């Protein structure tokens, strides 16, 4: 691990204030925050800013939660981010995705048209840093403007997290029943 979690004896008010953007009070500690947030806690001001953005993506987005999880899992797979994949499989299942649908995400395949469009959008953004005109036009038939904007920022935001987690060496916690922030919808 290149950047280890902040030790408990170094947690201060700045750290707790930064993480309070995403976590309830009872989880504002190294064990409750988990490995990723405890690692990000090493830079409280950056973490607070980034978590405000992440909070929107996870809890306030206009994008349907199921579609959001499709996008997150696809970018996590493409970026080889074990931490993000493990945590969002848990959330995706809570949003109704099946084991077969989750396995198909790794192949870039989906049975439903809109699901496939979301996976295509992830692949195009990851490869070309833009969604093709054809995919965009098809998305316009299913998603309104704000949903399409939230989709692009979800893919970009979780792509950024995957790069950070992979670079810092953050690995998923094994055996945790509660991986990351709870769905609040």
Image (tube, grey):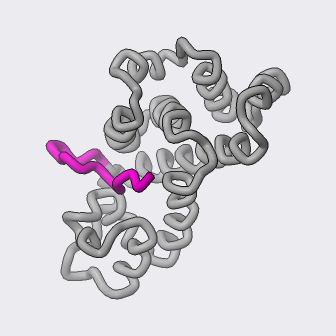
Residue 162 at x, y percent in the picture:
47, 45
Magenta: main secondary structure? loop
Name the residue: 35% across, 32% down. Answer: 93
Q: Residue 10: percent from the left, percent from the top?
A: 26, 81
How many marks can you see? 0
Q: Hey, which residue is sitting farthest front in the picture?
A: 185
* Residue 165 locus on image (x, y percent): 41, 50
Which of the 4 quarters of the picture holds residue 67?
top right
Residue drawn where x is 51% and y is 41% of the image: 65
Q: Is residue 149 magenta?
A: no
In the image, is residue 14 above or below residue 78? below
Residue 182 is inside the magenta segment: yes
Left or right of 1: which side holds 79? right
Q: Relative to residue 51, is residue 28 depicted above or below? A: below
Depth order, front residue of 123/2? 123
Q: Which residues are magenta?
A: 171-185
Q: Give the vertical position of 27 relative to 110 (above or below).
A: below
Placement of 6 over or under 94, stated as above or below: below
**Which residue is at a point 42% across and 19% down the rendered structure image?**
101
Across and down, in percent, residue 34 comes to 27, 59
Work out which residue is located at the far bottom of the displayed protein and give it. Answer: 13
Look at the image and tell me whether residue 7 can be seen.
yes
Residue under the image location 19 percent in, 64 percent down: 31
161 with respect to 144 (left or right): left
Residue 79 visible (yes or no): no
């Amino acid at each position: 691990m290149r950047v280890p979690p902040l030790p408990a004896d170094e947690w201060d008010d700045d750290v707790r204030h930064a993480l309070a953007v995403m976590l309830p009070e009872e989880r504002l500690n190294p064990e409750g925050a988990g490995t990723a947030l405890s690692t990000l806690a090493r830079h409280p001001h950056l973490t607070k800013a980034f978590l405000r953005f992440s909070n929107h993506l996870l809890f306030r987005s206009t994008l349907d939660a199921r579609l959001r999880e499709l996008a997150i899992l696809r970018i996590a797979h493409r970026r080889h981010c074990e931490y993000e994949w493990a945590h969002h499989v848990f959330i995706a299942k809570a949003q109704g995705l099946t084991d077969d649908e989750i396995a198909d995400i790794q192949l870039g395949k989906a049975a439903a048209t809109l699901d496939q469009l979301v996976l295509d959008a992830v692949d195009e953004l990851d490869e070309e840093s833009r969604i093709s005109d054809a995919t965009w036009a098809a998305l316009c038939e299913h998603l309104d403007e704000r949903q399409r904007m939230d989709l692009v920022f979800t893919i970009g935001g979780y792509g950024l997290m995957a790069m950070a987690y992979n670079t810092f060496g953050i690995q998923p916690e094994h055996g945790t029943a509660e991986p990351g922030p709870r769905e609040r919808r």
